[in-house]
Each structure stands twice: as C-alpha cells, then as structure tokens.
Amino acid sequence: MKPQKNLLALILVLSLLFVFSNRAICQDEEEKKEKKKDAYEFTIDKELARTLVKNQASSSTCWCFATLSFLESELLRMGKEKIDLSEMFIVRNVYPKKAQSYVRYHGKISFPHGGQCHDVLDMIEEYGIVPEETYPGNLYEEKKHQHGELTSILTNMLNAVLKKRGPRLTPKWSQAFEAVLDVYLGKPTATFTYKGKKYSPKTFLTDYLELNPDDYIELTSYTHHPFYQQFTLELPDNWTFNDQFYNVPLDDLGRIIDHSIENGYSVVYGGDVSSKSFFKKKGYAIVPVKDWEDKTEKEKKEKIKEPVEEKVITQQMRQKEFDNFTATDDHAMHIVGIAHDQKEHQFYLTKNSWGTDRKYGGYVYLSKPYVLLNITSIMVNKNALPGDMKAELGL
C-alpha cells in the first residue's frame, strides 16, 4: 500500500502546484490588464444618427468635413436616407471666392487654409451640393486628399498677381486660378444622375435633399460684444466678414449644446485642439485644475491613471483664453452625443475627420469644461434652441 500512498501524495502535490501556478498566471494577466487599463472609461448616454467617419487627410478642410457631417445627420433626423455629400465640391467653389477676397485685400487676409461652418452653407445656397460619388475632387492620383502642392501653387500664383508686374491687374489671373483647380480637383459638376433622375447641384438641394440653409445659425460667447446680439467674430479664418454670430452668455451656450443633443439635434464644434490636455492618441480632451505650465517636470511626466478633477469654466476665463490667443479656431468637429466617465463627469461624443485608424474609431470625447473653454463657435439648427433662447434672439 505504501507505493499507492506515495503516488497519491505526489498527485496531490502536483495538483496544488498546478492550481497555485495557474492562479499566479491569472494574477499576472490581471495585473497586466490593470496596467493597460485606460484612465478614462466612457459610457454613452445619448448618441445621434450620423454617417461614417471620413478622413480629410492633408487638406486643411475640417470646416467642410464637420459641417457636411452635421448636415448629413440633419438629413437622417429628417427621415432621409444616409447619404455621403461631397466636401470637395464645396472646397472647389470656395477657393475662387477666397482668392478674390485675398486679392481685393492685397493679401492681408487668410489664404488658403481654414474656413468657417457658414462657408459651407454660403456655397450650398449659391451653388447647391452633390453626392461624393458625383464629385470626389481628386484628380492627382492620390488615395487620400493631399492639398499641399495645390495650395502652394495657388498661394504663389496669387502672391505673384499682387506684385503687379504691369501697370494694373488683368482679369486673366482668375481664369488661370480656375484652371489650376480644374486640373487638381476637377470642373464643378453641372448636372448628374442620381437614382435614375437627373439633377443640377441646386435642384438636388431643393428637390431631393430639401435642406434649407436658412435653418442654421452660429453662436458664440464673448464679453467684448453685447450679449443677445449678432457680430462678426474676429478670427483669421472668418474671411467672409459678413456672416454673423449670435453672442450669448456662457451658461446659455452650454445649455444650448445640451438641449440640442437631448432633443435629437447634433452640433458643430469649431475651436481649439492645441491644448496639452487634448490627448489625440488617447481620444479625449480635458481641462485639469492645474495648468500645464504650472506643473513641475515630475508632474508633467506623471501618467493620468484615473479621471481628474477639472476647472469650473467662467466667462472671464473663456474671454482671457480668446484674447491671449490660447484658444483659437484651429479645428472643427461634429458633436453627436453625450457621455460620462467613471466619476460621472460629462463628455461629448465627437466625430472627427482624421480617419478611423485611431482610438475610438475616429471619435473623441471632449469634456464639458474643455468645450466651454475652447469652443470658439457652434453651429446648430435654430429649431434646436430652448424656447426662451429663440425668443431672446428673435428667431
């Protein structure tokens, strides 16, 4: 019986070793998972219908991508089918307008990059709109939008025109400008067939999409202009000078954003993304209580391990950031929902235009304090405003 007892004892020992070894391996795996665990975990509370994330690539046309994404969501809200609208059709029509302004102001305004949401609506109202398949706007044999060469040629052309080698400008420069755009982007679509019916860009807007550009307004919040009135927002990319923004107190601006989303209307974010606390790779943006420049070198190197407390944003803080050029309009995105982190802090689910090969598939989460501090303006459907705000603004 002795050999049997020894065998049983050996089996027991091996079994215990296996159990403890397996437990240790599991514990190591759990610890590794814990180490890799994201500091922020988001739960979506409200999300709105939207189209797929696109990639503006190297085109500096976020203003167009964000606004058309917004309008595509508007169409879905209206019960229309999902449709992909052409950004480059808008861009193709904007460039000659910007060039005319640039020349008329003797090169003293922004060209070629950047724009505002209203640029899209202005072009749609004047020229209409077409589907992406009708006008992809890429004739230069690249898979993604690459406008570096194009904009360099256009800028140098205009600057050469402004040097005025003769006694006066000739009308030919604008024709040469248009020809360059035709080579790189293509001639603007005049007519096309969609689902078996022929349209012009304008009839596609009015008869098929049934979008009304007058339904959309832009709002901001700054103290250097009176509240509840309109003004021209002083931004380098606001090159048209005649499109007006409604100015409301900060609390009202935040209330409008929340009310819009809760009632099924998405919002365009135009604002700053250059902050040290806009974490592109991690996919979120916050406003920590302690400013980056006030942190020690040790604090700057410390990794965020859990949601941090953020500043309470005031009207004065927002104005200061705008006046000292800390918060400017270097990017536009499309807010499509509301979320919260593990500590119940509010964030906005925001659709970006930097492609899908990123954290959260191309979406970013902007904390409410980040939005209130860094947003230079928003675009919304005027029907998305709370009733008292519509009355206050006379809409």
Image (cartoon, helix red, strand yellow):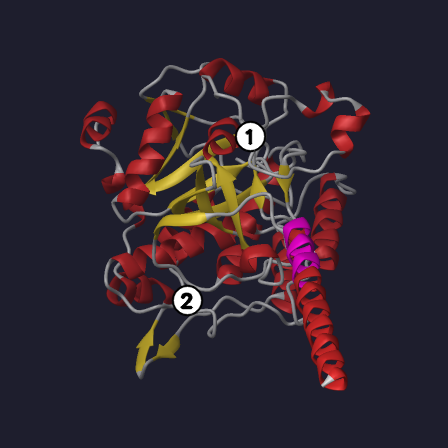
**Location of residue 208 by image quarter:** bottom left
Q: Which residue is mark 1?
A: 235
Q: Which mark is residue 130?
A: 2
Residue 336 visible within the image: no
> Which range is magenta?
26-35
Horizontally, residue 206 falls left or right of residue 135, namely: left
Q: Residue at x 54, y 70 (%)?
A: 136
> Magenta segment, principal secondary structure?
helix
Q: Mark 2 and 1 residues: CB-CB less than 8 Å, in contact?
A: no
Q: Please state which amino acid type lies under the numbered disc 2.
A: Val
| Magenta span includes 307 | no
Horizontally, residue 334 falls left or right of residue 91, namely: left
Viewer-side residue, 306 vs 392: 306
Q: Upstream in the sequence, badge 2 or badge 1?
A: 2
Measured as percent of width and height from the top left, residue 230 is found at 36, 25
Horizontally, residue 17 falls left or right of residue 126, namely: right
Residue 389, relative to residue 217: is it above or below? above
**Location of residue 257 by image quarter:** top left
Q: Quadrant of the C terminus?
A: top left
Dot 2 crowding, Cα within 10 Å, few <14, some 14–19, many 20+: many
Q: Please state which amino acid type lies under the numbered disc 1.
A: Leu
Viewer-side residue, 188 vs 119: 119
Q: Residue at x 59, y 32 (%)?
A: 236
Measured as percent of width and height from the top left, residue 140 is found at 69, 71
The local secondary structure at tag 1 comes to loop
Query: Seen from this angle, which residue lies furthest right?
Result: 297
Residue 257 visible within the image: yes
Q: Quadrant of the N terminus?
A: bottom right
Measured as percent of width and height from the top left, residue 346 is found at 42, 37
| Magenta span includes 27 | yes
